[in-house]
Image: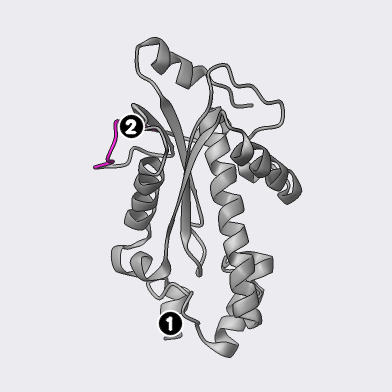
């Protein structure tokens, strides 16, 4: 289970506030990539907060509402849309989303803990934490905000483009999605820089 150990170490060294950052939607063939940044209050504890991938959709939704309505929690969210993903590539687009989420926080963090590897040229002091969403409460909270926000966006896109089944697979390259792509061709929300889509353009 995650905790605030990493955040506490930084705060005790005089570095605060500390934000956790995570992304959702790096691998799908369609839709934006989302990133969130979260600053939790000192001493924050939660028995159910964990890496979003380990939680059911229902639990994620409940935690999302709890986190985003808590006046003691500062959070920011950013989407990078498909045209920018195709122009910059998904890695740079993901890094851009993370940076924008950090800059969207109401309080400027002194340091950012980022899920995964170090992000080059990040706009604030930071370091990567591999599998950080299972280690840090701040990163876990960010993972939930990013995941739920992106899933909700894909639900909206499913209504606009019903033939692809975005509400089921959220844009990932499932067999059903690939079959729909072959049958109908890509829509504007498909990432043309990704091989399975590029082959059909």
Q: Give percent across and percent down for residue 79.
A: 44, 57
- Quadrant location of the N terminus in the rendered image: top right
The circle drawn on residue 126 is: 2
Q: In this view, does 173 lie above or below 152?
A: below
Q: Give percent across and percent down for residue 147.
A: 58, 51
Asked whether residue 21 is in view, the answer is yes
Residue 127: image quadrant is: top left
The circle drawn on residue 199 is: 1
Q: Give the range drawn in magenta.
A: 121-128
Residue at point 36% right, 55% down?
Answer: 91
Residue at point 71% right, 26% down?
Answer: 47
Badge nearest the viewer, 2 or 1: 2
Q: Main secondary structure of the magenta part?
A: loop
Q: Is residue 31 left or right of residue 84?
A: right
Direction bottom: furthest residue: 183
Q: Give percent across and percent down for residue 27.
A: 49, 59
Q: Give percent across and percent down for residue 181.
A: 56, 82
- Few, some or many C-alpha atoms within 10 Å of disc 2 (few <14, some 14-19, many ≥20)? many
Q: In this view, does 161 lie above or below 41?
A: below
Please tell me how many numbered marks the rendered image carries: 2
Q: Is residue 72 above or below residue 153?
A: above
- Few, some or many C-alpha atoms within 10 Å of disc 1 (few <14, some 14-19, many ≥20)? few
Residue at point 33% right, 26% down?
Answer: 110
Magenta residue check for 122: yes
Magenta residue check for 6: no
Asked whether residue 51 is in view, the answer is no
- Name the residue nearer the viewer: 127 or 60: 60
Q: Is residue 27 above or below residue 47?
A: below
- Name the residue nearer the viewer: 79 or 185: 79
- Name the residue nearer the viewer: 41 or 106: 106
- Quadrant location of the C terminus in the rendered image: bottom left
């Amino acid at each position: 289970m995650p905790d605030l150990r990493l955040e506490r170490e930084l705060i005790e060294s005089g570095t605060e506030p500390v934000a956790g950052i995570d992304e959702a939607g790096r691998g799908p063939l369609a839709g934006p990539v989302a990133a969130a940044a979260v600053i939790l209050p000192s001493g924050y504890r939660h028995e159910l907060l964990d890496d979003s991938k380990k939680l059911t959709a229902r639990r994620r939704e409940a935690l999302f509402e709890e986190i985003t309505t808590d006046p003691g929690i500062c959070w920011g969210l950013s989407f990078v849309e498909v045209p920018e993903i195709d122009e910059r590539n998904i890695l740079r687009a993901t890094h851009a989303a993370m940076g924008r989420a950090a800059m969207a926080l109401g309080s400027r963090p002194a340091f950012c803990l980022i899920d995964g590897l170090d992000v080059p040229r990040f706009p604030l002091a930071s370091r990567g934490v591999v599998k950080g969403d299972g280690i840090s409460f701040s990163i876990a909270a960010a993972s939930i905000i990013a995941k739920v926000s992106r899933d909700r966006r894909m639900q909206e896109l499913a209504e606009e483009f019903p033939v692809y089944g975005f509400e089921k697979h959220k844009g990932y390259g499932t067999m059903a999605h690939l079959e729909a792509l072959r049958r109908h061709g890509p829509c504007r929300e498909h990432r043309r820089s990704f091989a399975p889509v590029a082959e059909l353009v």
